[in-house]
């Protein structure tokens, strides 16, 4: 679905929410209380500024007695088959963000992955999948990286643990290309990247995957991911705590300059290893 038509469809979703809410005699605040979000969020849903999570759509159907209307239309709009159900909403928000801050403990963040690196990850998790399936998943992930190429790209900041650099996903050639790709983006001043070295020991958000997103016309959101599950956090108090943890993580990491040197050194090591095998 093209961006314009998708946005128009979300505007229809919001208009229907407003109409049916008013028919039920509920204010935005009253409906928000019943579906466990703020009245301000209901207003943003109605204006198509922010997209709801599926559980919110389900509760709206229950409160407004709309026979699954909002769940069904949500699935048509946001349940993109290219992404797992739990990540589809986060992928939508990525395209709207003005600032994205990633934290990864073991793998390269999706927005920074090369095709070969993504393919190696997909094959590891889906060893019996068809070539077409793997190809579709790789293309879907690479499509997300378009946001870093736009002239209006968001400010992007990634903090990686050194383990990300040392786990040889796909082998030395794939890793060399992957780390060179990240270094090139940093050298071109398209991204900021820092590395938390092994020597740092324990560090904030240890072992966690986290994405923080900020928007021009909506409150910030955090996304975390577990085993075949994801969670969008939009409670202001929780997001504030997450932002504070990310700030502490920045302090534990090497400077951008030292991090870039470590990235390039690791890439050179992989190149040497590739040339001797």
Image (cartoon, grey):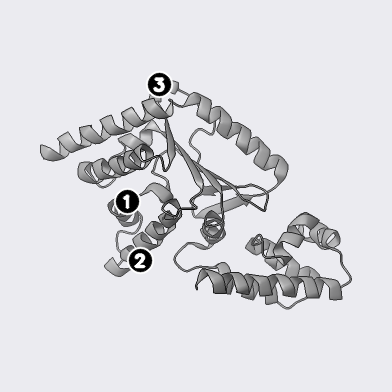
Q: Residue at x 32, y 28 (%)?
A: 261
Q: Quadrant of the C terminus?
A: top left
Q: Where does the image place residue 199, in percent across and percent down from the top left?
A: 40, 21
- Label ID, residue 199: 3
In the rendered image, the residue lying farthest to the front is 151
Q: Earlier in the sequence, mark 2 or mark 3?
A: 2
Q: Indicate the quadrant where residue 139 lies.
A: bottom left
Q: Left or right: 170 with respect to 245?
A: left
Q: Residue at x 80, y 68 (%)?
A: 63
Q: Left or right: 125 with respect to 61?
A: left
Rendered view: 99 above or below 46: above
Rendered view: 257 above or below 239: above
- Label ID, residue 136: 2
Q: Secondary structure at mark 3?
A: helix
Q: Earlier in the sequence, mark 3 or mark 1?
A: 1
Rendered view: 273 above or below 60: above
Q: Between tags 3 and 1, which lies in front?
A: 1
Q: Secondary structure at mark 2?
A: helix
Q: Which residue is at the front of the view, 260 or 172? A: 260
Q: Are marks 3 and 1 in contact (CB under 8 Å)?
A: no
- Label ID, residue 114: 1
Q: Left or right: 269 with respect to 62?
A: left
Q: Residues within 10 Å of mark 1 (few under 14, many from 20)?
A: many
Q: Where does the image place residue 176, in percent across and percent down from the top left?
A: 24, 41
In the rendered image, the residue lying farthest to the left is 276
């Amino acid at each position: 679905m093209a961006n314009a038509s998708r946005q128009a469809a979300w505007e229809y979703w919001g208009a229907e929410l407003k109409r049916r809410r008013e028919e039920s005699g509920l204010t935005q605040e009253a409906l928000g209380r019943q579906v466990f979000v703020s009245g301000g969020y209901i207003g943003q849903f109605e204006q198509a500024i922010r997209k709801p999570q599926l559980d919110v759509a389900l509760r709206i159907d229950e409160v407004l007695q709309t026979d699954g209307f909002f769940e069904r239309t949500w699935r048509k709009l946001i349940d993109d088959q290219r992404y797992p159900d739990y990540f589809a909403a986060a992928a939508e928000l990525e395209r709207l963000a003005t600032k994205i801050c990633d934290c990864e403990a073991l793998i390269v963040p999706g927005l920074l992955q090369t095709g070969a690196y993504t393919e190696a990850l997909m094959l590891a998790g889906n060893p019996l999948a068809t070539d077409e399936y793997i190809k579709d998943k790789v293309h879907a992930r690479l499509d997300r990286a378009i946001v870093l190429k736009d002239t209006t790209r968001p400010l992007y900041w990634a903090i990686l643990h050194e383990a990300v650099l040392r786990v040889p996903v796909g082998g030395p050639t794939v890793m060399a290309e992957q780390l060179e790709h990240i270094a090139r983006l940093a050298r071109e001043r398209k991204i900021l990247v820092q590395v938390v070295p092994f020597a740092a020991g324990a560090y904030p958000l240890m072992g966690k995957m986290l994405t923080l997103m900020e928007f021009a016309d909506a409150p910030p959101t955090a996304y975390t991911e577990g085993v075949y599950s994801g969670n969008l956090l939009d409670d202001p108090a929780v997001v504030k705590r997450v932002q504070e943890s990310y700030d502490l993580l920045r302090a534990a990491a090497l400077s951008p300059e030292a991090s870039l040197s470590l990235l390039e050194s690791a890439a050179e090591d992989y190149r040497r290893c590739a040339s001797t095998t």
